[in-house]
Image (tube, grey):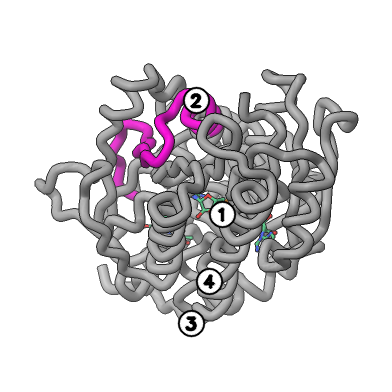
Amino acid sequence: MFNRILVTGGAGFIGSNFIRYVLINFPESFIVNLDLLTYAGSLENIKDLPSQKNYHFVEGDIRDEELVKNLLREHGLNTIVHFAAESHVDRSILGPRAFVQTNIIGTFSLLEAARKVWLDEKKLGDGEVRFHHISTDEVYGTLAPNDSAFEETTPYAPNSPYAASKASSDLLVRSYMHTYGLPTTLTNCTNNYGPYQFPEKLVPLMIMNALEGKDLPIYGDGRQIRDWLYVEDHCTAIWQVLQEGRTGESYCIGGNNQPTNLEIVDTLCAILDELHPNADGKPYALQKKLVTDRPGHDRRYAMKIDKIKNELGWQPKYTLKDGLLKTVQWYLAQKNWIEAIRKEKNYQSWVEKNYTNRTEAEK
Ligand code: NAD
Ligand code: TYD
């Protein structure tokens, strides 16, 4: 079983959900969480873990190859689940260098550590060790309205510096499998949402801005389409691919939905109107504001999930409506988390940088 795991980026959104999911459902596992605690990572995300005895946190950089090699040796780890990344497209537009450093050089460094310790020193192979790389649908580029959805064989065509850096890391993983025989698996997933997501991404940003009476900034015409997956469903898919997926394969993961951004924001507003109505009774949707579009904004993502469904029997458990409801409920109940994250991570300076010069778009 692949259950002595180095999780990278486990203080971030999906990584922290994954650690919680594993410690609750597979308590015989042992996890070392290596995280640099950048603006996106926080100890707040992992402070209430169900068990500390089979969990160990290390503050450090995935680019520190010696550190990673020592962690693999010291703890006898047989699995890497690699989440650590710069993950926000807008930040990659305003500052792409960190994306190359973390997503490309960082993944390269991790692969080197795994190759040297697992293959060269310990002579371990398929069935004994596993490098699982977490990636995104954005590596496939963008779709026109009637194009068929992305699948594992779709050619890579990344459009943002973020997507290009993730595509590069995917290709490095592939090359280590083919060249050195490093046992790898890879998952490309659609947009995640749910608890512990840093409030720079669409869903938590809209919830927080709505509650604070601020504008809800919608890029361009708001008719861009994404496929959305509740984070817990992503965690179950990763675990299944890790344990049952075929070595060397990639699997596409998604939520089987196609809402526009406007539909997402309208749904969130309607849920908030119901659960936490504005004091003056005004619908939250009145706060929506179309603003200047994101440069190079991908129009549509969609994912076929036939491979993971047919091979492993995985499919999403949560509908978009249920998942968004659970998410709003979580954020409404987490005032302390929100305050801590905002104070700790210079959230306001990002908001000013990204939104101040976005004038209202023409309607
Ligand atoms: P996130 O930005 O919330 O968290 C990233 C974590 O990585 C943070 O805890 C950060 O401190 C850590 N980190 C950054 N640089 C590091 C370094 N050099 N060394 C160690 N740790 C470092 O990201 P997320 O949304 O949880 O995404 C996790 C992974 O999933 C990423 O690889 C991302 O590309 C991928 N992904 C995300 C989504 C999504 O919708 N969020 C969808 C598909 C795939
Ligand atoms: P985001 O959560 O940044 O994810 P990604 O760019 O990886 O898909 O954005 C989701 C969609 O929402 C995307 O089309 C951009 C749009 N968006 C807005 O319209 N306004 C915003 O303030 C943000 C953050 C995103």
Classify 10 Å Cα crowding around label 2: few (below 14), some (14-19), many (20 and above). Answer: some
First in residue order: circle 1 vs circle 3: 1
Q: Is residue 252 magenta?
A: yes
Q: Considering the numbered disc 2 on the image, is that residue within a helix, a strand or a loop? A: helix
Q: Which x, y percent locates residue 52?
A: 88, 32
Amino acid on which the number 2 mark rests in the picture? Gln
- Comparing 340 with 26, the one in front is 26
Amino acid on which the number 4 mark rests in the picture? Phe
Q: Which residue is mark 3?
A: 357
Amino acid on which the number 1 mark rests in the picture? Leu
**Disc number lying in front (2 or 3):** 2
> Between marks 1 and 3, how big is the CA–CA gap?
18 Å
Q: Which x, y percent locates residue 27?
A: 76, 20
First in residue order: circle 4 vs circle 1: 4
Q: Is residue 180 magenta?
A: no
Query: Residue 240 — which label?
Result: 2
Kindly indicate the quadrant of the structure image that contains residue 331.
Answer: top right
Amino acid on which the number 3 mark rests in the picture? Asn
Give the extent of the magenta segment. 235-261
Q: Which residue is mark 4?
A: 99
Classify 10 Å Cα crowding around label 4: few (below 14), some (14-19), many (20 and above). Answer: many
Q: Ligand 1 is located in which of the four quadrants? A: bottom right
Q: Which residue is mark 1?
A: 205
Task: Work out which quarter of the rendered image holds the N terminus and state it.
Answer: top right
Describe residue 24's horizontal placement relative to residue 198 as left or right: right
Task: Work out which quarter of the rendered image holds the C terminus and state it.
Answer: bottom left
- Dots 1, 2 in contact, CB < 8 A: no
First in residue order: circle 3 vs circle 4: 4
Q: Considering the numbered disc 1 on the image, is that residue within a helix, a strand or a loop? A: helix
